[in-house]
Image (cartoon, rainbow, N blue to C red):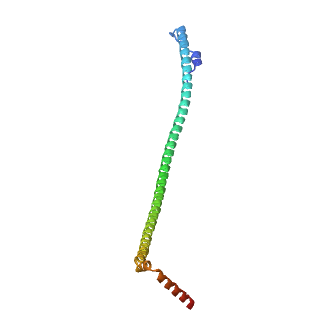
Amino acid sequence: MPLTPLDIHNKEFSRGFRGYDEDEVNEFLDQVIKDYEMVIREKKQLEEKVKELTEKLNYFTNIEETLNKSILIAQETAEEVKRNAQKEAKLIIKEAEKNADRIISEALAKTRKIAMEVEELKRQAKVFRNRFKMLIEAQLDMLNNDDWDHLLDYKLDDEDKLDNEAVKEMSES
């Protein structure tokens, strides 16, 4: 057990034949007591300061650990968000490519259908042109026919004969 200032104060020394000067020893002991009390107070203050600083250090160490954990969690979360965003981007691209393929396929099908319709219209136009041409040629043949010339040469006398013949034919029937 360490000495206390009271232990130093109450310490009795045995007297010897040629001992030390008692006043000097007491004066020295008083000085030692004062210094020892000051050292004890300083020690207590330093112990309190060490305790306070240790508590602060523990507090800041806990904060540091918490921050480190938070940083790690934030990094992991950021990585996960990044991975999810990349997955979503890939899905969006895949869906867009699918839609583009579908749109292209539909456009090609419509193009083929329109091309077939155009070919059918061309064929029908050709048929119509040929029939129309044949009709016009037939009409031209009729105009160029000699029967028209006979009609123009037809005389009124002949007209009476025709009328009589027509009346005859009607009466016979």
Determine the residue positioned at 50% across, 47% down.
81
Residue 155's place in the image compared with 73, above or below, is below
Q: Quadrant of the C terminus?
A: bottom right
- Return the x and y of residue 73 as percentages of the image width and height: 52, 43
Residue extending furthest toward the bottom: 172
- Return the x and y of residue 6 as percentages of the image width and height: 59, 18
Q: Give 100 or 113, whichever is nearer the viewer.
A: 113
Describe residue 36's horizontal placement relative to residue 104 as left or right: right
Determine the residue positioned at 56% across, 88% down.
170
Q: Give 22 or 61, whichever is nearer the viewer.
A: 61
- Return the x and y of residue 65 as percentages of the image width and height: 52, 38
Residue 85 visible here = yes
Residue 122's place in the image compared with 37, above or below, is below
Q: Give 10 or 125, whichever is nearer the viewer.
A: 125
Residue 30's place in the image compared with 95, above or below, is above
Determine the residue positioned at 59% across, 16% down.
10
Quarter of image, res 41: top right
- Return the x and y of residue 75 as percentages of the image width and height: 49, 43
Quarter of image, res 30: top right
Determine the residue positioned at 58% across, 15% down.
9
Q: Quadrant of the N terminus?
A: top right
Residue extending furthest toward the front: 157
Marker count (numbered): 0
Q: Give 11 or 33, whichever is nearer the viewer.
A: 33
Quarter of image, res 101: bottom left
Residue 1 visible here = no
